[in-house]
Image: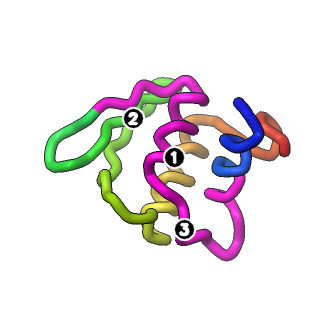
Amino acid sequence: MNHHHRKILHSLFTHPINGNISLLDVETVFKELGAEVAPARSGKIHVSLNGHSANFAHSQHSLSRDEVVQVRKFIETCGVDPEKDYPL
């Protein structure tokens, strides 16, 4: 994972919650983590990582704070620790 992707991953876990993260950037990070990303119904994307899966709304704008929290929880559930696994 390159430095740019690591910065995006870490920005998902910043406090206060960053409301300026593109879903396209997050999709790239998911792929770098080894996830399978596929389009799903109703304008969503389906992500499978480490035996866990989730659907996220695919929007043309930045992720809302609630969506960032959902992505953060999914990454944590998959056992990824950005500080330990992907330090800056």
Q: Residues within 10 Å of mark 3 (few under 14, many from 20)?
A: some
Secondary element under disc 2, as helix, strand or loop, is strand
Tally the marks: 3
| Residue at the image point whose x is 49% and y is 27% from the top | 35
Distance, label 1 to label 2, CA atoms, is 11 Å
Q: Is residue 36 left or right of residue 18?
A: left
| Residue at the image point whose x is 31% and y is 51% from the top | 58
Distance, label 2 to label 3, CA atoms, is 21 Å
Q: Is residue 87 left or right of residue 20?
A: right
Percent position (x, y) of residue 34? 55, 23
Q: Which residue is mark 1?
A: 26
Secondary element under disc 3, as helix, strand or loop, is loop
Q: Is residue 18 magenta?
A: yes
Q: Residues within 10 Å of mark 2 (few under 14, many from 20)?
A: many
Quadrant containing the C terminus in the rendered view:
top right
Percent position (x, y) of residue 69? 51, 62
Amino acid identity at mark 1:
Val
Q: Relative to 28, is 83 above or below?
A: below
Q: Which residue is mark 3?
A: 20
Q: Nearer the viewer, mark 1 or mark 2?
A: 1
Give the mark, 1 or 2, whose residue is nearer the N terminus.
Answer: 1
Amino acid identity at mark 2:
Val
Q: Is residue 80 magenta?
A: no
Percent position (x, y) of residue 19? 54, 71
Q: Which residue is mark 2?
A: 47
Q: Which residues are magenta?
A: 10-38
Distance, label 1 to label 3, CA atoms, is 11 Å
Q: Relative to 51, is 79 above or below?
A: below
Residue toward you, 26 or 55: 26
